[in-house]
Image (spheres, rainbow, N blue to C red):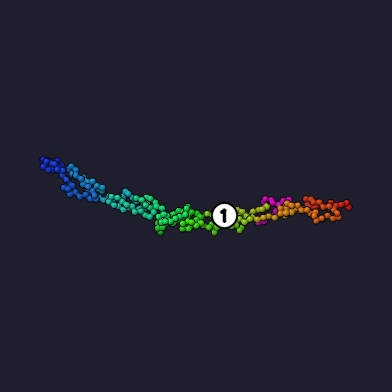
Amino acid sequence: CSCMPGFTGKNCEEVIDYCRLLSINCLNEGLCLNVIGGFTIFFSTPGEFCEVQIDNCGTNLCENGGTCIDYEAHFKCVCPIGFEGERCELDIDACLFYNVSCAPGALCFYDEENQRSHCVCALGWTGQTCLENINDCEVNQCQHGATCEDGINKYSCNCVPGYEGPFCEVEINECLSSPCKNGATCMDLIGHFSCHCAAGFKGETCSGRMNECLDRPCWNGGTCEEDINGFKCKCPFG
């Protein structure tokens, strides 16, 4: 019998094993399979005999500065501190990684140069973990004996009597409310006022009338009568 390609034997009943006949040695776990009239290779890497190693890092790049290590059928990313995941795509909380607990409102940053985490405090706070309130009264503009009261990133001035304003810089004019009565003259003082009463009036605000007739100022039997100017004498005949 004259056999077709790929067959042999007296009656062409045997399939030729080209993989064994040609001593095909597939590399990198490639598989040689017989086909009618030849052979074919199932492979995961390129090359006629699977001899070419695929660069798995060429198309599977690591993120965030990760280092790619190439293996025969896969790759692995070695992540820098602060990142994790198959491609180093996940950001690790550096504070939790180094067991640093920043106060609420503070931010945690990783210092790659010194390889440590540190807290960046919100305004008004200080300290390694931002738990210390800055004393804003150490540098303040309170005036005229005012007392400084510290707050969070601010302070307030508690004024002494007679002053007002954010820094107690304004002297209060107590005469603006016209406390003096009956034509009295008001004199503004620090924290209070003084009234200079007109004739016939007395008291802190000159609201009381003076009875000048009590001193019996009239002579020769004259009768004393009070008036707006103080008193007048009503004289007897003669």
Q: From this viewpoint, is residue 183 visible? A: no
- Most foreground residue, 173 or 72: 72
* Of 96 and 167, the residue lying toward us: 96
Q: Is residue 158 toward the left or the right of residue 133 in the image?
A: right
Q: What residue type is labelled 1?
A: Ser
Residue lying at 23% horizontally and 50% vertically, measured from the top left: 27
Out of 116 and 56, give the one closest to the viewer. 116
Taken as a whole, is the magenta stretch helix, strand or loop? loop
Question: Horizontal and vertical percent for residue 200?
Answer: 76, 53
Q: Name the residue under label 1.
A: 156
Q: Residues within 10 Å of mark 1 (few under 14, many from 20)?
A: some
Left or right, 234 with respect to 160, comes to right
Q: Does the magenta stretch include residue 181?
A: yes
Residue 21 shown in magenta: no
Task: Provide residue 190's location: percent of width, then percent of height.
Answer: 65, 56
Q: What stretch is highlighted in magenta?
A: 176-190
